[in-house]
Amino acid sequence: MKKILITGGAGFIGSHVVRLFVKKYPQYQIFNLDALTYAGNLENIVDIEKAPNYTFIKGDIVDAVFIDQLFAEHQFDGVLHLAAESHVDRSITDPLSFVKTNVIGTMNLLNAAKATWQGNYEGKRFYHISTDEVYGSLGAEGLFTETTAYDPNSPYSASKASSDHFVRAYGETYGLPYVLTNCSNNYGPFHFPEKLIPLFINNIIQNKPLPVYGDGKYTRDWLFVEDHAVAIDLVFHEGENHDTYNIGGFNEWQNIDLVKLLCKIMDEKLGRAAGTSEQLISYVKDRPGHDLRYAIDATKISKELGWKPSVTFEQGLERTVNWYLENQTWLNNITSGEYASYYEKQYSN
Ligand code: NAD
């Protein structure tokens, strides 16, 4: 039986990855390590918590002693590392916490894997899940490929770029078997409502303003989270050792167009007159260092591993909206806590 450690499995993408692995691989023992920060929520994985091949461990990847003990006790064969501080706005107000979790935390996991495997790398793999934001910003043309130079602009992307470099360096220096993926913006069920799509769904439900940064022309490539989880499974099992893959939806949207599409879907779902939700759009002061455009060239993973997104954006968005409308208790439980005061502070001026 393989022992697999998934970090950040109570978060948005991690919960989808944990669910997929627990269900698809009954022959694996899946350990979900998560500190349960404001972004971690055990409600995200309540459906698999009693599965015989699943164990939840509450713990902090920044705690090196704890991480070393955990690896020594369980002798994991594989690590899928998703735990991170993930929100750009929070990285602007508190960059150091991003260095701690995203850089030091990743280092602790690398060191523990290296110490556990001791150069015996047969059947072992360290998988770092990362973001396309490490590449910086594109102009109107072009796509990020796996060879695009890193050029991060926010403390979040700088911390992820740094951890990517350390993962590669451990591969080069110590031979540690790794794979790395850089993915575009995800959306879907269980997405914490500080991120654009769930934030706006929630605000439309509550008739609250929809804060659009700057002129709304920022462009992002969007991928349905379940398609990302499938890509992660594929790369973990079939990706080339010491290699990187870009993952994206071939699905670019300017923020303002996306918001208008979302408003249209929400008006239909809520039985409101066409154009009602659009009236909630409110342009707010731009985020400093805001990257104009991200767009991923996902040709490599598609050609080499046969992956492609399974849903169109319209299908994925419809499923996402339906999920939020059907899971308003989940949404209310989250927004009534710490997030409510953060939100007030963030958008009060
Ligand atoms: P998230 O914020 O929803 O979840 C992060 C999880 O990590 C939470 O459960 C949190 O409790 C846990 N965590 C945070 N600090 C921790 C610590 N010190 N120790 C242990 N656990 C800790 O993030 P997400 O959106 O699911 O992103 C997961 C990963 O995917 C991140 O590494 C992120 O950089 C990457 N990524 C995200 C996107 C996206 O669009 N969301 C796109 C590409 C890559």
Image (cartoon, helix red, strand yellow):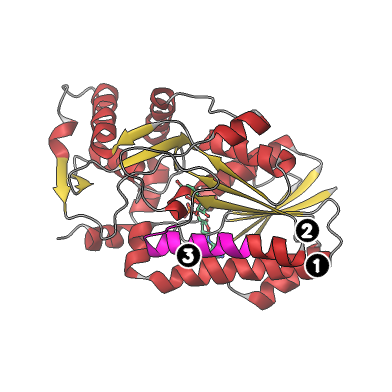
Give the side of residue 149 with respect to residue 117, left or right: left
Residue of label 2: 76
Give the side of residue 78 with respect to residue 253, left or right: right
Give the side of residue 230 with respect to residue 336, left or right: right
Look at the picture and state if 216 lies above or below 124: above
Looking at marks 2 and 3 on the same chain, the residue that comes earlier in the sequence is marked by 2
Looking at marks 3 and 1 on the same chain, the residue that comes earlier in the sequence is marked by 1
> Secondary structure under badge 1?
helix
What is the spatial separation of the Cα atoms under label 2 and label 1, in whole angstroms? 8 Å
- Tell me if label 2 and label 1 are in contact, CB under 8 Å: yes
Q: Amino acid at mark 3?
A: Ser
Mark 1: give few (<14), some (14-19) or many (20+) Cα within 10 Å.
some
Residue of label 1: 116
- For the point 49% across and 36% down, the residue is 297
> Secondary structure under badge 2?
loop
Total labels: the figure holds 3
- For the point 68% across and 74% down, the residue is 66
Query: Can residue 61 be seen in the rendering of this structure?
Result: no
What is the spatial separation of the Cα atoms under label 2 and label 3, in whole angstroms? 25 Å
